[in-house]
Image (tube, coloured by chain):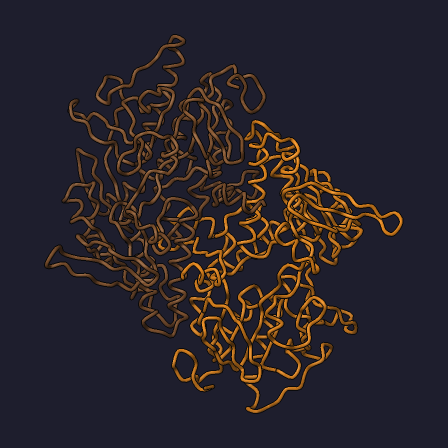
Chain colours: A brown, B orange
Amino acid sequence: MNTSNSTGRPAARPRVLIIGCGFGGLAATRALAGAPVDITVIDRSNHHLFQPLLYQVATAGLSAPSIAAPIRHMLRGQRNVTVLMAEVCGIDRQQRRVQLSDGQSLGYEYLIVAVGATHSYFGRDEWAAHAPGLKTLQDAFALRARVLKAFEQAESSPDPALQRACLSFVVIGAGPTGVEMAGTLAEIARHTLKNEFRRIDPASARVLLLEGSPRVLQALPPELSAKAEAQLRALGVEVRTGCRVVGIDADGVEVQTGEGAVAATERIAARTVVWAAGVAASPLGRMLDVPLDRAGRVVVDGRLNIPGYPEVFVIGDLAAAQSLQSDGRTLKPVPGVSPAAKQMGAYAASQILRALRAPQGQVLPPMPADAPGAFRYRDYGALATIGRKAAVADLGFVQFSGYFAWLFWLFVHIYFLIGFRNRLVVLMDWAWAYWSFQRYARVVAEPVDAVQKAGD
Amino acid sequence: MNTSNSTGRPAARPRVLIIGCGFGGLAATRALAGAPVDITVIDRSNHHLFQPLLYQVATAGLSAPSIAAPIRHMLRGQRNVTVLMAEVCGIDRQQRRVQLSDGQSLGYEYLIVAVGATHSYFGRDEWAAHAPGLKTLQDAFALRARVLKAFEQAESSPDPALQRACLSFVVIGAGPTGVEMAGTLAEIARHTLKNEFRRIDPASARVLLLEGSPRVLQALPPELSAKAEAQLRALGVEVRTGCRVVGIDADGVEVQTGEGAVAATERIAARTVVWAAGVAASPLGRMLDVPLDRAGRVVVDGRLNIPGYPEVFVIGDLAAAQSLQSDGRTLKPVPGVSPAAKQMGAYAASQILRALRAPQGQVLPPMPADAPGAFRYRDYGALATIGRKAAVADLGFVQFSGYFAWLFWLFVHIYFLIGFRNRLVVLMDWAWAYWSFQRYARVVAEPVDAVQKAGD
């Protein structure tokens, strides 16, 4: 069984299975270009998503094809790769096989699991229906529809209380996504929709940003948090820190401020609530049947392996990895950001290449996170945009905010967008798409399980 | 009740209600710019759709925002217009009121009904699930997903019979949409997806175009039909005329060829079937409680009025109108094409302006279609594209096909796209969207009834 793969060809070369083609899976696949392996990339979607700009799709600034590209198109030149749009429903580490929901199973010599994260409602899953999060194109479309329809409903409703609720937008969680969403919503209300309504003034919309901790953008130094908050306020966002959400329903949000004797609850009527607070590892991690951390992430060793399984790598947001700091002594958790996922992908690929060169039958012991050769995360800094001409940047050696930080943010995102699909060319692509054979919009928003329903 | 509108302001000016903002409704609205009336435009969608290029969205050549623009953005400068995204659920011609599904009702002095057409499965509505048509953005997204996922499924399935079925595409109906779809599908299989698959050859896909009548593009002269068919065959499309579809299910299509004793049925296994055969007027026509023709269209007089109701106009695909030919004697039905809808919209607006200038209390009798001043359709010709560098054109005084016809088709479509949203600028828009406040992607694909479900 281990000597043939599903194409019927003899598996002369080691099979590498990569589950998930986000930043981590894509980096691993590319790092194995030209290697003497047969790679199969499995993803539920047909597209790789440039998630840092997903909030722009949700807020109608970009169309989906601008930040999503078909995986098989991106990898078409890499001849050792087969791409399958499929759903994984089981992983058997003993037999080294992966089960797909269409009934097939695929064997592997190396496995990279890179399926990322999803929203966490901290055990309050009933909130999901009222406060959608933002991880997939479908999420972005759903959110876009909600936001635009809220303004529409406000215009068509004769009921002032309903109008107010429609014109109230609550963003929960002031991490980078929450800050970007709140800033952009304020921009839409104050600028984009100007003069388009007759019965309401969209500029009268309230945008609230709720955060449980004492400051926005907690990952940044306090001075930058303060600057970000000031910029948000200047855009018209009501920022409330130290404010705990205790209830969400179709009509709004209930928040608690203060503790103990001074605790007070308040109801905010709002028809649009965005969840940007909690992230949990993808449920696929549970299929691995190994220890998970509190956030549901798979605990990996210094080689990003599941300890005892040197052929299984877990990378990206799904991995609970530690990395030695620049001091060379302290270990810190690797953050769930795209540069970390990319670095892990490249590292896992390098470990596979290394193993291919090692003598047959060599057994690798688990590697401590502080061992030489273990994965080390290189932190290039943090960056968050707040709105037009407003952003904050922390590059470690320097911190800045405002217009210059915003220009820097633009530059960095266009740079990485180019890295992923040559964005400068894409601008021309749009103009010439019709005259050429290439179709930039080959994106299916629904994950594969929706297909099967539609196809049946 | 008739003296105030729903904004609470006294209705000093006559109220014009326009239901539907397709080509007809939009043309009527624009023709009333500056007129002393209060216009309310009601549409289920938040966007006006440039339907002639919808097949390009379905075949992933264009993103949705490229051919759809928010209605209220298009009309923002026209101060006598209020736009409502709402669903009409009743029309009371006696009380001159329109009922919305959110419970509101709006009074009118003039009503223009321009809600267009939908698919007709000739009484076989069970076919709809297996053979989707192409009228809305949602249709286009669903079809895009089907087409792309069929190739994905072929790649991931180890079953050769299923692979064949996945790589078989059937288009039913060889009018302009069917011809465009079939040509583009052949192009995708043979060019766009080249080198992207490892287990299948997308170029081996079959594309069948089935037509019940003896030739494709029946509205064009026979010589052009023959040329179009030859161009389709050159692109790799299997064209079958005189072929009647008698069954459609999840696994394929059953067709009958010949009649009587020579009749034979054949089964074509295909996972993707596109319906481009039948069009019926929107069900809203039935709410008017007036005589409909066989296709469900509302029979109108020469003024595009429901006879006896000079304040109610029915235009576009919903209207069964007659027009005097250039010979000045024979009457012919106005075809269901976008230029006709636009001309009807402008005509209805001109009749309203005329009535506003007429003495109060004047009663207009129904106008015969051959009366002086009745609506006359100006036919500028027909044009259909088949694929890359292939098209046919009939301008009445001249007919041509091939590369030149294709260039002409491009020119005409870009020209009309400009007419609707300044398309040359849109090319730059795409590049600069991020730096500006304007958001070109403000499009909600779901009609309003989907909102209410999502919002509850």
User: Which of the 4 quarters of the picture holds residue A25?
Assistant: top left
Question: Would you place residue A24 above or below residue A2 in this image?
Answer: below
Q: Nearer the viewer, residue A364 or B245?
A: A364
What residue is at 30 percent from the left and 33 percent from the top? A292
Q: Residue furthest left?
A: A261
Is residue A419 among the parts visible in the rendering? no
Residue B405 drawn at (x, y percent): 68, 48
On screen, residue A112 versus residue A412, left or right, reads right
On screen, residue A345 versus residue A240, left or right, reads right
Question: Would you place residue A155 above or below residue A456 in this image?
Answer: below
Q: Quadrant of the C terminus of chain A?
A: top right
Residue B23 drawn at (x, y percent): 57, 64
Residue A66 drawn at (x, y percent): 44, 43
Q: Residue furthest top?
A: A359
On screen, residue B345 versus residue A156, left or right, reads right
On screen, residue A258 versus residue B149, left or right, reads left
What residue is at 23 percent from the left and 31 percent from the top? A333
Residue B285 drawn at (x, y percent): 62, 71
What residue is at 32 percent from the left and 20 percent from the top? A308
Question: Would you place residue A437 above or below residue A132 in this image?
Answer: above
User: Which of the 4 quarters of the picture holds residue B268?
Assistant: top right
Q: Nearer the viewer, residue A47 or A317?
A: A317
Q: How many marks?
A: 0
Is residue B341 among the parts visible in the rendering? yes
